[in-house]
Image (tube, rainbow, N blue to C red):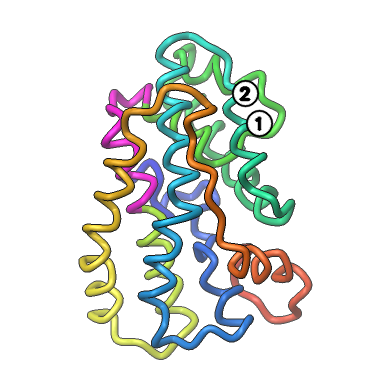
């Protein structure tokens, strides 16, 4: 889990999983659990599916270009794509450091700008994770990143955000069931949350922000 955790210094700590843009866009703190649920049912399915397919193709010795393109086609906002790529580059450097000469390092090297789920999926292959654990890692990381950001952005009790994380468990497992079996880019879910994307798209222009996304 720590390979995708925001505490690892490869840029994940700069992400709020869309929470800061949502709060700036008018979301009330009491509605954060609904935001978690919405993300798990939409954008997290896309990222988790992308990571699972990237893992499979890395293990099979296949290129990742079409996985990257499939993810980009399902991520309309260039702002959201750029934030993911900024972290993905850091994840690639980490993969090359931890597993030099591995299939993961070789698969990620040709990509000019790997997205975060593509890099994490390839790293999952190097770490020996199966599809279910890869999907769970991505979904868990999204929820925990949002919960960690909430403590910095809202006057909350840490016990409350921990409760959110625990209650998100069934939603995380639903993501696992939906995407753990995927092997081809065409199978990656194509779901979106337009309002969340709109908030994130406007985020870089806001003069007061703590997170990049």
Where 42 sits versus 104, above or below? Answer: below
Q: Is residue 138 magenta?
A: yes
Residue 122 locus on image (x, y percent):
46, 26
Q: Residue shown at 65%/66% (left/top)?
A: 200
Where 46 sits versus 53, above or below? Answer: below
Residue 33 locus on image (x, y percent):
36, 75
Where 187 sits versus 31, above or below? Answer: above
Q: Quadrant of the N terminus?
A: top left
Q: Is residue 56 left or right of residue 177?
A: right
Give the magenta-colored segment's residue range.
Answer: 125-140
Q: Would you identify the image quadrant in which residue 126 lies?
A: top left
Look at mark 2 in the image and give the residue it sits on.
Answer: 66
Magenta: main secondary structure:
helix
**Secondary structure beneath label 1:** helix
Residue 133 locus on image (x, y percent):
27, 36
Which of the pair 60/83 is nearer the observer? 60
Could you say which disc has been placed on residue 85 in the image?
A: none
Neighbor class of circle 2 (other Cα within 10 Å; few <14, some 14-19, many 20+) is some
Look at mark 1 in the image and give the residue it sits on.
Answer: 69
In the rendered image, the residue lying farthest to the top is 61
**Secondary structure beneath label 2:** helix
Neighbor class of circle 1 (other Cα within 10 Å; few <14, some 14-19, many 20+) is few
Residue 12 locus on image (x, y percent):
50, 53
Q: Residue shown at 62%/31% (left/top)?
A: 68
Q: Is residue 102 left or right of residue 208?
A: left
Q: Residue shown at 42%/25% (left/top)?
A: 55
Q: Residue shown at 28%/57% (left/top)?
A: 171
Q: Would you identify the image quadrant in which residue 190 lies?
A: top right
In this rendering, the count of numbered labels is 2
Q: Is residue 15 left or right of residue 53?
A: right
Q: Are marks 1 and 2 in contact (CB under 8 Å)?
A: yes
Q: Is residue 128 magenta?
A: yes
């Amino acid at each position: 889990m720590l390979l995708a955790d925001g505490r690892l210094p490869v840029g994940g700590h700069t992400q709020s999983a869309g929470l800061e843009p949502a709060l700036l866009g008018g979301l009330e703190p009491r509605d954060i659990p609904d935001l978690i649920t919405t993300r798990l049912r939409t954008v997290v399915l896309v990222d988790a599916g992308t990571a699972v397919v990237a893992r499979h193709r890395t293990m099979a010795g296949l290129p990742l270009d079409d996985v990257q393109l499939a993810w980009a086609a399902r991520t309309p906002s260039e702002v959201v794509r750029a934030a993911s790529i900024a972290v993905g580059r850091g994840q690639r450097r980490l993969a090359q450091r931890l597993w030099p000469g591995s299939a993961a390092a070789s698969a990620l090297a040709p990509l000019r700008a790997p997205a975060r789920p593509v890099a994490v999926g390839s790293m999952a292959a190097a770490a020996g994770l199966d599809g279910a654990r890869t999907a769970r890692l991505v979904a868990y990381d999204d929820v925990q990143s949002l919960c960690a950001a909430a403590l910095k952005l809202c006057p909350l009790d840490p016990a409350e955000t921990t409760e959110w994380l625990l209650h998100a468990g069934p939603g995380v497992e639903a993501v696992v069931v939906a995407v753990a079996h995927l092997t081809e880019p065409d199978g990656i879910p194509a779901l979106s949350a337009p309002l969340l994307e709109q908030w994130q798209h406007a985020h870089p222009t806001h003069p007061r922000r703590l997170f990049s996304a």
